[in-house]
Structures are given as structure tokens and as C-alpha cells.
């Protein structure tokens, strides 16, 4: 069975194409605000993905966006923790400390990855698990 990579809107298409060519499937995931694919809140044991990828701005939403159907990063972290789904957030090395500072209680399954190494890191996570 092929492993599935869930991706938030805007994820680099070259990364996704490379992963498909490597034998992995991809499926769009919505942060609840952009309606880009399956809503992240409905991920469960029956439809879970093996990896989530995206950018920091897709999970770090303004507080008032939750009322508009969006989710908080805490919601996304909860899904990742509950279903043991690694989340790779693409952010340049020189911005990773600033990115981490935006969040509280970052689970071990969340990694901040430089764009130059995201494909290698995604392959590693998918081949390891």
C-alpha cells in the first residue's frame, strides 16, 4: 500500500511531484479556512495520512479566523499527536527559531525544515515509518 502525504495549500508542486514519482500518494488538506481538500479536523484512523507538509503561515492563523471555520495550530498539533502523524513545516534555517517561537507545546512529530532539505527529509520520514 502506498503511503500518503497530506499537504496544505501552496506546498511546492515540485516537492509533491517528486514524492509521487517516488511512489507516494498526495492528498490536499484544508486548514478549514482555505477549503483546500480534506479538512484537517476530520483526519482519523480510517483516513489518516502518513505525513503532513506545509508552510508555517498555513497553520498559524489569526485568532479570529477560527470563527470563520479555520483551525488553530493547537488543533493541528492535536491531530498530529493523536494519530502520530509527522508534520514538516517548511521554513528557511535562519527563520526557524522565530517560527518555533510562534507556537506553544510543539509536539515531537513537528519539524521545521529548510526548503533545500525538505524532499530528503520527507523521503526519510516516509521510508522510515
Image: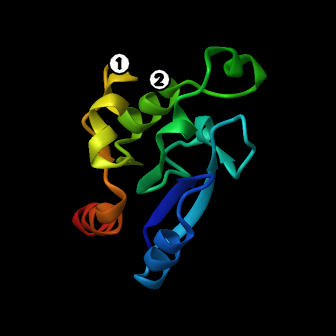
- Residue extending farthest to the bottom is 21
Where residue 42 sits, quadrant-wise, is top right
Write the residue at 70% across / 52% down: 37
Q: Quadrant of the C terminus?
A: bottom left
Is 88 left, or right, of 30 in this rendering?
A: left
Determine which residue is flagged by label 1.
104
Q: 115 or 83: nearer the eye?
A: 115
Determine which residue is flagged by label 2.
74
User: What is the total number of numbered labels drawn onto the structure image?
Assistant: 2
Write the residue at 72% across / 35% down: 33
Q: Position of residue 43 (x, y in %)?
A: 56, 43
Q: Please report whichever mark, 1 or 2, sits nearer to the chain's N-terminal start.
A: 2
Q: Position of residue 6 (x, y in %)?
A: 52, 56
The local crowd at label 2, few if under 14, some if 14 to 19, many if 20 or more residues have their Cα within 10 Å, is: some
Q: Secondary structure at mark 2?
A: helix
Q: Is 20 placed above or below 114 here? A: below
CB under 8 Å between callouts 1 and 2?
yes
Is 82 left, or right, of 64 in this rendering?
A: left
Q: Is 39 placed above or below 105 here? A: below
Q: Secondary structure at mark 1?
A: loop
Q: Position of residue 26 (x, y in %)?
A: 55, 67
Q: Position of residue 92 (x, y in %)?
A: 34, 49
Residue 117, which numbered label? none
Where residue 57 sits, quadrant-wise, is top right
Q: CA distance from mark 1 to mark 2?
A: 8 Å
Q: 85 or 112: nearer the eye?
A: 112
Amino acid at each position: 500500500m502506498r503511503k500518503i502525504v497530506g499537504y496544505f495549500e501552496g506546498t511546492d508542486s515540485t516537492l509533491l511531484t517528486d514524492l509521487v514519482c517516488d511512489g507516494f500518494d498526495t492528498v490536499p488538506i484544508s486548514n478549514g479556512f482555505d477549503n483546500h481538500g480534506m479538512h484537517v479536523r476530520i483526519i482519523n484512523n480510517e483516513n489518516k495520512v502518513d505525513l503532513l507538509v506545509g508552510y508555517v503561515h498555513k497553520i498559524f492563523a489569526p485568532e479570529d479566523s477560527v470563527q470563520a471555520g479555520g483551525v488553530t495550530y493547537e488543533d493541528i498539533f492535536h491531530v498530529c499527536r493523536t494519530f502520530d502523524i509527522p508534520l514538516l513545516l517548511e521554513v528557511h534555517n535562519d527563520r526557524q527559531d522565530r517560527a518555533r517561537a510562534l507556537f506553544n507545546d510543539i509536539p515531537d512529530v513537528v519539524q521545521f525544515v529548510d526548503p533545500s532539505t525538505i524532499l530528503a527529509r520527507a523521503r526519510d520520514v516516509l521510508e522510515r515509518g
